[in-house]
Image (cartoon, rainbow, N blue to C red):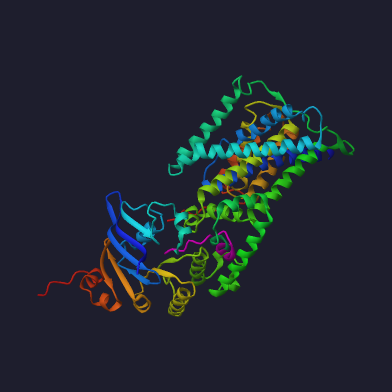
């Protein structure tokens, strides 16, 4: 029983990170109908650049709340900016091109980041240790079930950002414009909403969340290399599809479900299968319910 | 009297198809002009060209003295042109109120920053916009509908909500694309009164596409007729009704007398 709960806890932590990444996929898909395959790499950059930031500021040498907070903010800001640049440079010129071109551009950006990152002059191919921004401690224990402060922290930060996003999307004018553009960007434009700016803002927002996810990932799995973003990125994509791509609550649900599935598979089946389970789920979803758990059927407009 | 909207020699081609050809049209401030013509005459294309959905392949369009053809739709909207759609295009994922709130959209840059930083100014502006949205919905008799999803509203109210949303952008020129389509007689009568009332209250200039001849003839002092993308007539309802080419366009060519 305790080991089961331990796996559930582990799944929640993992799921919170997947959910944060999945939000970026789903928001961008919402406004642009694009699966932004470079999103996982933005997540990696969040983790990777935080290592350099912590090294440069000295926050990595001594765990402190200030250091953690500053690194988190740094990762969000820098990833937001990177996401914005990617949109401007790679996707905006293709706004009127067929969607397939956009998808190929996304894969291209992903390959570019991963491979340029492996150059020795950039990050290099060797994994780098993520600094201990907080001291890992056990904060609660029941029998063999232990809860560490990192797990609590990851979950709290993830939930906090999700709550913030909810307020943003449902109670601000930009959020309203985002929902309008997601529904019909042409009509939104005719009502005076600058769809281009809204799409840009959505990229910035989603990428900032990926940056935060990168830091949380680094705290949990403190070894980062330029390919780190690939697998979590794909799993978060599966999470977005599972929840219903385009749906924000769906991304949250999907993220946590994938996290749990992975954690339980690793424990009860074999850790060999833990990466495969996400794809099994993807195939099942596409067969049984292609619109995802909370997704709506898309009606083609005539 | 200088025209608010000036369309000069506008042509719109899609591949080889000439949807609109050599169109000249002037609408003076405060006018209510009807745009009629058989199906496929290019009426909605004219609206699309005015609002920036399409960039005309020929000619120029000026609004309040400024050239607007080729401008992005959101910039044209901000200069004061709003429209409704033949097949309703509300934001169905939003409530009736939010559809209108969205229309009050003036300075996007402040919006983005304010939204991100959740500034006090953003909330104050937001409160002011909410109040004006309530008032606007009340004026159109949609006060009770505001909390509901726009998708659930009855058809006639959806049409009115589209007008409310258009008015929220604070237009000088309102383009109505078949506002009475699908309405019953009572609803049409109510709409006729509403259009007249809104025109006076908001100092609007209106260009309306409508298939219901009785309605067009009764509300529009001036009517322009399109056929095959070309303007074939223009004048008062009386003149239009007697215009030979118009009768031909609608009824087909007169059979040669035997």
* Left/right of residue A243 with respect to residue B63 in the rendered view: right
Residue extending farthest to the left is: B258
Q: Quadrant of the C terminus of chain B?
A: bottom left
Residue stretch rendered in magenta on the structure: B85-100
Viewer-nearest residue: B96 or A72:
A72
Residue extending farthest to the front is: B1
A6 over B153 or under it: above or below: above
Indicate the quadrant where residue B239 lies.
Answer: bottom left
Queried whether the magenta region covers residue B90, the answer comes back as yes
* Left/right of residue B33 with respect to residue A49 in the rendered view: left
Percent position of residue B252, x then y: 22, 69
Indicate the quadrant where residue A17 lies.
Answer: top right
Percent position of residue A39, x then y: 59, 37
Regarding residue B252, the answer to whether it shows in the image is: yes
Q: Residue at x 56, y 60 (%)?
A: B102
Regarding residue A222, the answer to whether it shows in the image is: no
Percent position of residue A133, x then y: 78, 32
């Amino acid at each position: 029983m305790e080991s089961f709960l331990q796996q559930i806890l582990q799944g929640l932590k993992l799921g919170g990170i997947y959910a944060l990444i999945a939000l970026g996929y789903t928001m961008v898909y919402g406004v642009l109908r694009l699966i932004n395959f470079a999103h996982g790499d933005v997540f990696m950059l969040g983790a990777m650049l935080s290592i350099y930031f912590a090294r440069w500021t000295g926050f990595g040498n001594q765990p402190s709340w200030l250091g953690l907070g500053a690194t988190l903010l740094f990762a969000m800001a820098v990833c937001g900016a990177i996401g914005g640049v990617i949109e401007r440079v790679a996707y905006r010129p293709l706004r009127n091109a067929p969607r397939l071109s956009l998808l190929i551009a996304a894969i291209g950006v992903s390959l570019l980041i991963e491979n340029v990152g492996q150059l020795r002059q950039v990050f290099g191919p060797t994994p780098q240790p993520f600094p201990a921004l907080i001291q890992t401690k056990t904060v609660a224990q029941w029998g063999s079930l232990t809860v560490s402060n990192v797990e609590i922290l990851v979950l709290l930060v993830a939930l906090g950002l999700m709550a913030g996003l909810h307020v943003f999307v449902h109670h601000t004018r930009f959020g309203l414009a985002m929902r309008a553009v997601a529904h019909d960007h042409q009509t939104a434009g005719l009502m005076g909403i600058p769809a281009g700016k809204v799409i840009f803002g959505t990229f910035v927002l989603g990428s900032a969340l990926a940056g935060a996810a990168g830091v949380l990932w680094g705290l949990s799995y403190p070894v980062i290399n330029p390919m780190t973003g690939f697998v979590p990125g794909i799993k978060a994509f599966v999470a977005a599809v599972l929840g219903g791509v385009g749906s924000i609550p769906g991304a949250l649900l999907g993220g946590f479900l994938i996290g749990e599935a992975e954690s339980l598979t690793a424990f009860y089946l074999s850790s060999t299968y833990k990466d495969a389970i996400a794809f099994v789920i993807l195939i099942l979803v596409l067969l049984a319910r292609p619109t995802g758990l909370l997704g709506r059927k898309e009606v083609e407009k005539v | 009297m200088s025209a608010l909207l000036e369309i000069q020699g506008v042509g719109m081609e899609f591949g080889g198809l000439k949807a609109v050809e050599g169109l000249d049209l002037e609408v003076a401030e405060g006018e209510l002009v009807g745009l009629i013509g058989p199906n496929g005459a290019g009426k909605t294309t004219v609206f699309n060209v005015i609002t920036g959905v399409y960039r005309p392949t020929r000619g120029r369009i000026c609004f309040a003295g400024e050239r607007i053809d080729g401008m992005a739709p959101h910039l044209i909207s901000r200069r004061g042109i709003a429209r409704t759609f033949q097949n309703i295009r509300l934001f169905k994922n939003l409530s009736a109120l939010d559809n209108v709130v969205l229309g009050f959209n003036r300075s996007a840059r402040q919006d983005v920053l304010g939204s991100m930083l959740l500034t006090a100014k953003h909330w104050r502006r937001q409160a002011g916009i909410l109040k004006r949205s309530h008032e606007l919905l009340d004026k159109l008799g949609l006060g009770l509908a505001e909390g509901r999803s726009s998708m659930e509203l009855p058809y006639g109210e959806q049409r009115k909500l589209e007008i409310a949303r258009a008015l929220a952008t604070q237009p000088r020129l309102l383009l109505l694309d078949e506002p009475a389509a699908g309405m019953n007689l009572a609803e049409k009568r109510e709409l006729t009164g509403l259009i007249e009332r809104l025109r006076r209250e908001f100092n609007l200039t209106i260009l309306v596409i409508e298939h219901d001849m009785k309605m067009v003839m009764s509300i529009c002092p001036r009517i322009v007729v399109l056929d095959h993308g070309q303007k074939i007539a223009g004048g008062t309802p009386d003149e239009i009704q007697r215009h030979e080419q118009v009768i031909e366009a609608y009824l087909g060519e007169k059979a040669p007398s035997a």
